[in-house]
Image (cartoon, rainbow, N blue to C red):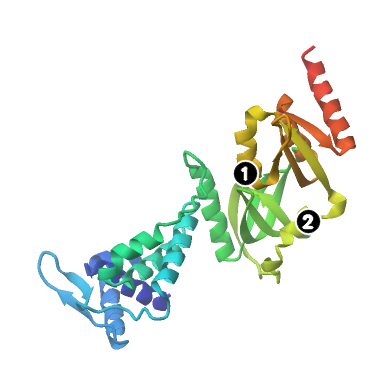
C-alpha cells in the first residue's frame, strides 16, 4: 500500500539520515522511479527530503528536522519500545520493526542515550533457553494467518494422545503459564478451542479466508473453559525439600507453604484430565498428593500399575 510505504520511507530516512534510492527501491520491491515519486509526495506533505551528492550521498531528511513528539512522552515511547522488543523475542514482526524505527526517529539525538537507558530497564524474553527456531517459525506463520484472516490447517496431538487434522479460524495467540496457545474457531468441532502450540504440528496457511467472529478478549474466554467447576479440582501437593527451588520456579514463592518438616505444600485448582495425572506422576516419589482422596487413590493405582511392568 502506497501510504504505508511513504510512512515507512519517512521513518527510515529520519533514523538513517541518508539512504541510496536503489536501496529503498530494493527494500520495498519497487522501481527507483517510484521511489523518487514517493519522495516528491513526502516533500509535498511538508517533510523536507533532499538529495546529497558524493561518496556518502543519498536521499535524506533536511538536517535538524525531527517529527513532533509531543503526542507521547519519552517514558511512554520507552514503554512501547520495551513491549515491542519483548514481542520480537518470540516471532518476527515486520510491523513492529517499522514502529521501532519510527520511535527511534522521534527521539532527539541529545536524548538518545537517556532514552536507551529507559527502554532497556526491562526486557521480557519469551523464548526458551537456548532458543527455539522451530517454535519461532511456527509463531510467525500463525501470526501471518491471523493478520490475513486466512484459515489454518494443522495436525493436533491432544493430552490423551489422539491425533487429528484440524482446520481453524485463527483469532489470537495467547501466552499463558509460560506456554504459547492458539485461540481460534475450530471448524471440526464448531466452537472456539485453545490449542497448545507444542502439540500443534505442520501449520499451513490456506487460500480460503474467513470473517472474524465477535469475541471479547478482555473477558479471557479461555479461562472460562479452564475454570469450569465441573471440570476442575482443588489439588493439594506436598513436595520433598530437595526440589524446593524447582517448586518455587514452577508455582511461584507466593503460592507455596513450608510445613514443619520443610516440605513444600501447594494448593492449586486444575482441570481434571489425563494431563493432570501425567503432570503429578512426572515428579515420581518427590511429591505426595494430599487431597482430594479420590485423586490420591488414582495416583497410587497408576504408580502400582507402572511398577508392575518392571517386576
Would residue 160 be visible to someone looking at this image? no
Mark 2 Cα shell of 10 Å, populated few (<14), some (14-19), many (≥20): some
- Quadrant in which residue 280 is drawn: top right
Q: Residue at x 72, y 58 (%)?
A: 222
Is residue 124 left or right of 74 when viewed as pictured?
right
Q: Find disc 2 in the rendering and name its residue.
A: 225
Q: Which of the two discs, 1 and 2, labels the residue nearer the N terminus? A: 1
**In front of the other: label 1 or label 2?**
2
**Residue 34, percent from left and from top:** 30, 75
Q: Residue at x 69, y 42 (%)?
A: 256
What is the number of callouts on the image?
2
Q: 166 or 257: which is nearer to us? A: 257
Q: Find disc 1 in the rendering and name its residue.
A: 198
**Residue 129, percent from left and from top:** 49, 40
- The Cα atoms of the two marked residues, 1 and 2, are separated by 19 Å
**Residue 118, percent from left and from top:** 39, 62
The answer to whether 216 is drawn above or below residue 90 in the figure is below
Is residue 220 left or right of 133 when viewed as pictured?
right
Q: Residue at x 71, y 66 (%)?
A: 219
Extreme-left residue of the structure? 54
- Quadrant in which residue 267 is drawn: top right
Where residue 39 is drawn, which disc sits there?
A: none
**Residue 123, percent from left and from top:** 45, 54
Q: Secondary structure at mark 2?
A: helix
Question: Does the residue at mark 1 contact the one at mark 2 (Cβ under 8 Å)?
Answer: no
Mark 1 Cα shell of 10 Å, populated few (<14), some (14-19), many (≥20): few
> Where, quadrant-wise, is the C terminus in this rendering?
top right
Extreme-top residue of the structure? 311
Q: Residue at x 72, y 29 (%)?
A: 261
Amino acid at each position: 500500500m502506497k501510504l504505508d510505504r511513504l510512512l515507512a520511507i519517512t521513518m527510515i530516512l529520519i533514523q538513517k539520515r541518508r539512504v541510496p534510492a536503489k536501496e529503498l527501491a530494493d527494500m520495498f520491491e519497487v522501481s527507483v522511479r517510484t521511489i523518487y515519486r514517493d519522495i516528491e509526495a513526502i516533500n509535498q506533505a511538508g517533510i523536507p527530503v533532499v538529495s546529497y551528492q558524493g561518496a556518502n550521498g543519498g536521499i535524506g531528511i533536511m538536517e535538524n528536522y525531527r517529527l513532533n513528539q509531543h503526542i507521547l512522552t519519552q517514558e511512554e515511547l520507552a514503554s512501547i519500545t520495551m513491549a515491542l522488543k519483548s514481542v520480537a523475542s518470540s516471532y518476527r514482526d515486520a510491523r513492529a520493526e517499522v514502529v521501532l524505527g519510527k520511535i527511534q526517529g522521534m527521539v532527539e539525538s541529545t536524548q538518545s542515550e537517556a532514552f536507551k537507558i529507559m527502554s532497556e530497564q526491562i526486557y521480557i524474553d519469551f523464548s526458551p533457553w537456548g532458543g527455539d527456531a522451530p517454535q519461532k517459525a511456527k509463531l510467525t506463520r500463525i501470526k501471518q494467518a491471523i493478520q490475513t484472516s486466512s484459515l489454518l490447517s494443522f495436525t493436533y496431538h491432544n493430552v490423551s494422545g489422539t491425533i487429528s487434522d484440524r482446520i481453524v479460524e485463527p483469532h489470537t495467540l495467547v501466552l499463558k503459564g509460560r506456554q504459547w496457545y492458539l485461540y481460534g474457531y475450530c471448524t471440526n468441532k464448531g466452537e472456539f478451542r485453545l490449542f497448545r502450540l507444542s502439540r500443534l504440528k505442520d501449520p499451513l496457511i490456506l487460500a480460503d479466508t474467513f470473517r472474524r467472529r465477535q469475541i471479547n478478549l478482555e473477558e479471557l474466554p479461555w479461562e472460562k473453559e479452564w475454570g469450569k467447576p465441573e471440570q476442575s479440582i482443588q489439588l493439594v501437593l506436598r513436595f520433598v525439600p530437595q526440589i524446593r527451588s524447582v517448586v518455587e520456579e514452577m508455582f511461584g514463592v507466593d503460592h507455596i507453604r513450608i510445613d514443619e518438616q520443610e516440605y513444600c505444600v501447594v494448593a492449586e485448582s486444575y482441570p481434571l484430565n489425563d494431563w493432570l495425572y501425567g503432570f503429578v506422576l512426572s515428579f515420581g516419589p518427590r511429591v505426595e498428593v494430599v487431597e482430594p482422596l479420590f485423586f490420591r487413590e488414582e495416583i497410587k493405582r497408576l504408580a502400582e500399575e507402572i511398577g508392575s511392568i518392571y517386576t
